[in-house]
Every structure is written in C-alpha cells, then in structure tokens.
Image: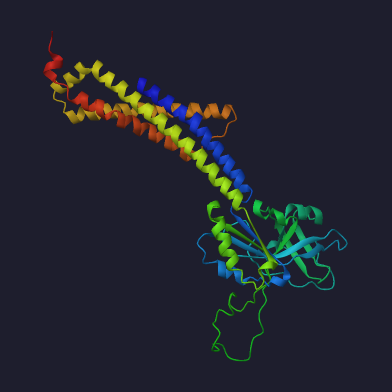
Amino acid sequence: MLTMAVVAALCSTVLLTAGRTEGSATAVLTSLDASGTRSIIVRAQPAAALDTSVLERLRPLRDVAWVAAFGPAEDVTNAAIPAGPRIALRPTYGMDDPAPMPAAPAPAAPAPAAPAPATPAPATQLPAAAVVTPEAARQLGLADGVGAVASPSSGTVWLVGGRLELPPDLRFLEPIVLAPAPQQHPPQPAAPSGTPGESPAGPSGTTGDHLPQPVAVLVVRATSPALVGPVAAAVTSLLGVDDPTTVTVETSEQLAAVRVEVEQQLGGFGRAMVLSSFGASAALVAAILYALVMLRRRDFGRRRALGAARSLVVTLLLAQTGMLATLGAAAGILGALCALAAAASPLPSPPFVAAVGVLAVLTSVVAAVLPAFVASTRDPLRELRVP
C-alpha cells in the first residue's frame, strides 16, 4: 500500500506542477501560433510583374509547409444589389495542401447583360464557385454565404458557394471574396506539337498551356517558427522580380524567436521538475521495498526452503510492485486531472498524461529490482533457524 501511495503522490505531483506547466505552455504556444509565427507575407506592386510561376519555383523548398498567391483586387457587389457595398475580390492560387484555402476551381463564365439570379441552381449543377469571408458576406448581404457577386467594371459574375473562415495569418485580407483561379491559355500556334525549344509543360513557371497570372500578395508558411528567417531569404531570392523595391516582405521572425524562447524555457522547467520528482520517487520506492524485504525475510526464506527459485522470488516481487504502481498511477492521474479541472487550470495533453503514468510504473519496477534481488538471496537455513 505504501508503494501505491507513493506512486499516486508522484503522479499527482507531476501533473499538478509540470503537467499544469505543459498545459499552460501549449496554450501560450497556440496563442503565439495564432499570431502567424510561421508566415512570410510578400506584397507586390503591379510594376513588380510577380506572377504565379513563383509557385513552381517555391515547390522544391523542403521547409515550406504551404503557400498561396492572391491576384490583384477587383471590387465586386452583390449581383442582386448593384448599388450595394463594394468588397475586394481576389483570384486565388496555391500548392496542393490541406490548409484551409479553397481549391483552385474554374471561374464562372462572364455574365450576360442581365444580372445573375441571387438563388443559384441545385448544387449538382453548380460550377466551382467563389467563397466569401463572414465579414464580407455580412456587408454584401449574403446571409448564408450563397449567391452571386458582380464586378461593376468588367460585368463578370462569380457564383458564391459558401463562407470561409480565414486562418489567423490571412485575416489581413478581410473582408474579401476569394474567387476561383482564372485559367487563361496562350494562343495555339499553327506549328505542330513538339516544336523544338519548348517543352510540353509550357513556358517556365506554367502548368501545361496555362499562362502565368499576376500576383499581388504571396503568403508562405514555414514548417516551424525557427525556420522563418531562412525561408524568407529563400522566398525573396526566388520571387523573380526585376526591381526588388517593388515588393515588400513581412515576416514574423521576431515573434517566432519569442516562441522558440518560450518553448525552451517552459520545456526546460517541466523536464527539471519531472526528473527530480521521478528521482525522489524511485528512491522512496526502493527504500520502502527494502524495508518490506527486511520485514518479510522469514517469508522469503520459507519460499526458498519450499523450493522456490531465486528468479521466482524476483518475479513475484516485481509483479507485485508493478500491479501496485499501476493502481497508484491510475488513482494519482485521476485525482490530479479532477483537481486541475475543478480549478479551471490548463490540462496537460493526453500523451503527457500517458507518459507520466507509464514512466511512474517503470520507475517503480526498476527501483524494485535491487530489493527483489536481496530477497532472492536470503538463506533459508538462516532465516528459519529458531533462536
């Protein structure tokens, strides 16, 4: 029972101290990540001639987790309310990635003279549509995020197929309508395919026979905050613009450095607390089991006299310790989590909780090895001798 109490106290102590710190660190790091600690934002003036070919140049970079490009903004209104508020619409382009960005669908065809109806056709007949952010939907009067928007300057109409909540590093674009990427094709020459000097993939930076499209904003996410600086330098070198003064590159490198420092400091404190707690627990368990061996030495002597092998004595003591430690770890973890929840404190992550329980049991079993070996070496004749 003492072993179970020690292990329960160990797990409770670790979870109430290092576990709470780990939960707080996760919350702090999540908050920092929400500020875009991995993002590089490139803004290009029209004279920069930045186009979508940059996406192909960025594709080989291993430290780029995701990239998206946005074309020049065009004002649009609700197609049913031509005199209504105007919201910026941007065509979107991006690499294949599960990030919360719309896939690059085909654009809606130019509208006829009459505006498109506000209520679209059934979903099975809809072409790929644009998406609208919640604030843009409110200003445009698209209550459900479904309808159509039109450009007063070009007369083009885009079907709007839903709303999209932008991730934190893209909220500077709000309010916005994200349109399907336009697919423009170069004029087909009369010469047969396979003309020398041109590959089937088309001009550099294009896919197939699609022409590069102008890019006004480029957003790149690094795989980790620590790599923001190197990735920003690589992205800048691959933009392919003639005049670097026509582009501006914004990074979160300073915020990323703060994140790394916070993670290291909080992680170092948690590791020191866990190591010291488990070291003290191992010493206590070893002392308790050694005292138990001394108190039960006659019992171990009788077992040896009845033919029990040394390995059996060691196995019995280790199994007993492991079972008691498992029960103690479960009780301690449950009590600590209830206490943290009652105090509205951050809860440690499930992997951390599981690691504490497993490590507590393993520490107890390892600490029991020496006392178990001592118990197996008791001399039956000496222990059973009557004074």
Q: Which of 80 and 326 is in front in this view?
A: 326
**Quadrant of the rendering where the N terminus is positioned:** top left
Question: Does residue 180 appear in the picture of this structure?
Answer: no
Q: Residue at x 76, y 52 (%)?
A: 135
Q: Residue at x 56, y 88 (%)?
A: 193
Q: Nearer the viewer, residue 94 or 52?
A: 52
Question: Does residue 272 appear in the picture of this structure?
Answer: yes
Note whether 187 is above or below 177 in the view shown.
below
**Residue 217 appears left or right of 12:** right
Residue occupying the far right of the picture: 83
Image coordinates for residue 137, horizontal then vertical, percent: 77, 55
Q: Nearer the viewer, residue 14 or 301?
A: 14
Image coordinates for residue 280, horizontal then vertical, percent: 38, 27
Note whether 280 is above or below 33 in the view shown.
above
Note whether 371 is above or below 74 in the view shown.
above
**Quadrant of the rendering where the C terminus is positioned:** top left
